[in-house]
Amino acid sequence: MYELISVGERTYYIDCPAKIGVVHGENNGVYLIDGGSDKDAAKKVRRILEQNDWTLLGILNTHSHADHIGGNRYLQEQTGCRIFSGGIEADFIRHPILEPSFLYGGFPPDDLRHKFLLAQESEVTDFSDPAFPQDIEIIPLPGHSFDMVGFRTSDNVVFLADSVNSSAALEKYGVFFLHDVESFLNTLDTVEQLSAALFVPSHAEPTGDCKELVRLNREKVREIGDRIVSLCAQPCTVEELLAGLFAAYDLTMTFQQHALIGSTLRSYLTWLKNGGRVTAEIRKNSLLWQAV
């Protein structure tokens, strides 16, 4: 764990729970792709940089989830590096309380204000700034998060962030977090058409061909959608649907999982409603969902 692996003349990744890219800039300067999950992870990353006599020039954040930005603050304070992001993701990085608030749908209780959902804030430079490394391509990959992106380095290595999940993760977790189901499916189409010397997903093994991962993720989304429609055979509330979804996938309910899967369920319901597969109706002051 936290082993530095070379995948190109100027491109590396650090093997950790959410893989971190390392890209050579000028002289001994490097850019990170994502900043690690927390302060402890960032310390390990900094140690790797020091061992190689590398200077951290900047962190390129794929998106604002805490397991990708949790080390930002420490690294920025220690090195003075820039942190690059864009769109809504930049706002969430500047104001991390937005993440648990978004998931909860209101001001989050203590149960959701911890390092796994609430990173420390950091200063952000927009992708459009001239200081952004011009030899790195930004690839929009929305769906898992609002404005998530991937990056292509000069070695033709593409870092895919959380646009695809491993087969093991799909099997283990059953339902994975999504913000926008339709955008996620469109992103899968984009990834399927990409070519690269190597693809590095954050939570799957690097591969030269993503088509199988894309297929598995697409099938899992459709499976979950079908399961939700079946649970809507009779009119039911979101809470009833959530309980049915947890039972169907043998998931363990916790406060955090209620927020994460609850948010994902609502996103699926939007997708299914837009597709004409479920309807929503208010009866006796309850919002009820039913299959068409």
Image (tube, rainbow, N blue to C red):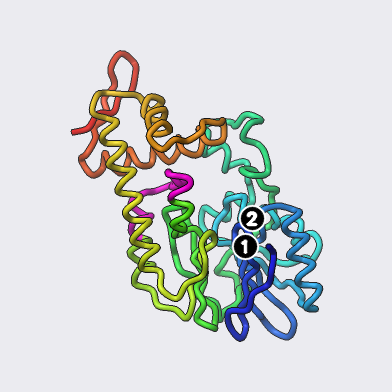
Please name the residue that numbered disc 1 is placed on: 34
**In terms of depth relative to the viewer, which is nearer, 40 or 124?**
40
Question: How would you rate the neighbour count of disc 2 (Cα within 10 Å): few for under 14, some for 14-19, many for 20 or more?
Answer: many
In the displayed structure, 36 sits above or below 27; it is above
Name the residue type under label 2: Ile
Residue drawn at the location 64% of the way across and 51% of the way down: 94
Please name the residue that numbered disc 2 is placed on: 69
Whether residue 184 sits left or right of residue 66 in the image: it is: left
In contact (CB < 8 Å): disc 1 and disc 2: yes
Residue drawn at the location 18% of the way across and 33% of the way down: 292
**In terms of depth relative to the viewer, which is nearer, 47 or 126?**
47
Name the residue type under label 1: Asp
- Percent position of residue 151, x then y: 52, 71
Q: Which residues are magenta?
A: 171-186
Which quadrant, please, contains the N terminus? bottom right
In the displayed structure, 144 sits above or below 116; it is below
Whether residue 287 sits left or right of residue 290 in the image: it is: right
